Image: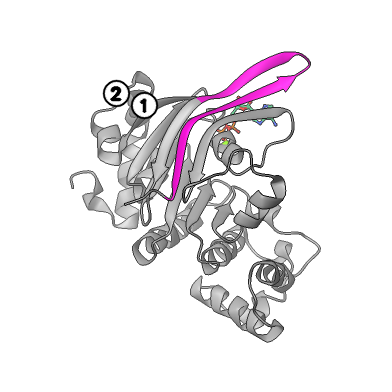
Amino acid sequence: MEPVLEVKNLMVELRRKNRIQPIIEGIDFKVFPGQCLGILGESGSGKSMSLKAVMGLLGADFSVTGEALFQGENLIGKTKEQLRRIRGKRVAMILQNPMTCFDPLYRIEDQLSETYREHTELTKKEIYEKSLTVLTAMQIKNPEEAVKKYPHQLSGGMLQRIMIGLAMSMEPDLLIADEPTTAIDAITQFEIMKEFIRIKKESDTAMIFISHDLGVISAVSDEVLVLNRGKMADKGTFRQIYEQPKDPYTRLLVEKKKAVMDQYHRALGRKGVISQ
Ligand SMILES: Nc1ncnc2c1ncn2[C@@H]1O[C@H](COP(=O)(O)OP(=O)(O)OP(=O)(O)O)[C@@H](O)[C@H]1O
Ligand SMILES: [Mg+2]
């Protein structure tokens, strides 16, 4: 099987006032259709920066080298406009804080319409119907009422669900979720994780799931990449990382998280994952 995304020797440097600061120092990974790559690491380890670099979301102060082959096409070196067109349709991104993804001045309906207008040929009526379908699929009650609301009138969990529904309705080839459950309460976290597990079961979308939390990563990931200070600390199947971490840093993360992770699996009903 061909990978959807293959990143080779990705490096990111911050160049400011004659100072060069390495941010990402040579990372490699592949993501395949229907599979989920988990990227694990502590705060500041370079998880977000590595994906932002690949998707062209870094400012002019950053220099990015290496290769990021998306369906065989190198994304590094593409213009902002070319990348913007790829994002949102072929690649969907879900970010940490759902509030920041919605414009507070516009109703949910208008924000969904804008995405569909830009990336599809749907008519106004079809867009409205599609918006309701997305909300219904994401188990939002009274979708007709919900689309009329402004972001601050909905909970963080509901907004995140709408984001995920919107992203998946574009049928992307790659879904990147950067700490999608960090800003929401624990109960909603489980609900959102269930959505990701469902997406993985029901679609062929390749997924990259970023988290500092091994419990969250273990719930969806097939392969795991562990980052430590911008470098790859470990890479392998979830089971390898969990049972035989090569790197002392990974070992520490695993030890710290074993109890929390067991709780997660009980709650998500994914008990078999450790012993499969
Ligand atoms: N805008 C920026 N300017 C300068 N340095 C930055 C900027 N954003 C991030 N960095 C640096 O890049 C490194 C990696 O940051 P990154 O945001 O990728 O971490 P992360 O693993 O996503 O952490 P978190 O779990 O907190 O989201 C950090 O050392 C950080 O200080
Ligand atoms: Mg981050």
User: Is the C-beta separation of discs 1 and 2 under 8 Å?
Assistant: yes
Q: Which residue is mark 2?
A: 246
Main secondary-structure element of the magenta-colored stretch: strand
The magenta region covers 4-25
Residue 183 percent coordinates (x, y): 58, 48
Please name the residue shown 74% across and 67% down the image.
150
The residue drawn where x is 65% and y is 67% is 119
Q: Residue at x 30, y 44 (%)?
A: 262
In the rendered view, does 210 fall on the left or right side of 150?
left
Does the Cβ of the disc 1 residue fall within 8 Å of ligand 1?
Answer: no
Residue 184: x, y in percent?
Answer: 56, 51
Residue 131: x %, y % from top left:
61, 76
Q: Residue furthest front?
A: 73
Q: Nearer the viewer, residue 178 or 274?
A: 178
Q: Residues within 10 Å of mark 2 (few under 14, many from 20)?
A: some
Residue at horizontal 72%, vertical 14%? 19
Q: Is 11 part of what is drawn in magenta?
A: yes
Name the residue that disc number 1 marks.
250
**Is residue 8 within the magenta segment?**
yes
Q: Residue 269 appears in which quarter of the rendering?
A: bottom left
Can residue 213 be seen from the camera position used here?
Answer: no
